[in-house]
Amino acid sequence: MRNRNYLFWQTNSLPIKVFDRKMLEQKLDYIHLNPLQAHWNLTDDPNSYYFSSCSFYEQEDKKFDWLTHYMDAM
């Protein structure tokens, strides 16, 4: 508790179980479109945001060689 003034992330994450492909794709779309939100203003195109997996899925970009397509993991 001594460092709570310096915490960036919330300490109580609320994980949710993903039950089906539709739900997974909904969450993935949210993650990919989040950098476009006006309050973040990080990019105009989700594929150009470096730290996103969007270009992996849409353009087959391999800059992160450790990424696995979600359909290969289901």
Image (tube, grey):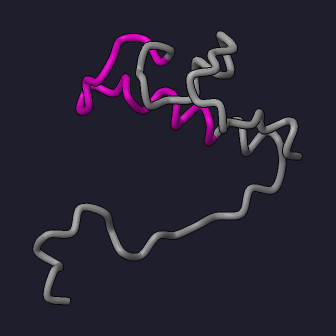
Rendered location of residue 25, percent (x, y): 71, 36
> Is 58 left, or right, of 34 in this rendering?
right
- In the picture, measured across the screen, residue 53 lies left or right of residue 5, that is right
As rendered, which of 57 and 25 lies closer to the eye?
57
Residue 50 vertical position relative to residue 68 in the rendered view, above or below? above
Q: With 16 as the anchor, is 8 left or right in this view? A: left
Q: Position of residue 55 (x, y in %)?
A: 58, 17
In magenta, the rendered stretch is 27-46
Count of numbered labels shown in the rendering: 0
Residue 60 magenta-highlighted: no
Residue at 52% from the left image edge and 70% from the top image edge: 14
Q: Quadrant of the N terminus?
A: bottom left
Residue sitting at 43 percent across and 13 percent down? 48
Q: What residue is at 50 percent from the left and 15 percent from the top? A: 47
Q: Is residue 49 left or right of residue 74?
A: left
Q: Nearer the viewer, residue 3 or 12?
A: 3
Q: Quadrant of residue 4?
A: bottom left
Q: Is residue 19 above or below residue 68?
A: below
Instruction: Note whether 29 is above or below 6 in the view shown.
Output: above
Q: Position of residue 17 (x, y in %)?
A: 71, 63
The furthest residue to the bottom: 1
Q: Tell me if residue 35 is in the magenta stretch.
A: yes
Give the residue drawn at x 43%, y 11%. Answer: 45
| Position of residue 19 measured from the top left corner of the image (x, y, whole percent) | 81, 56
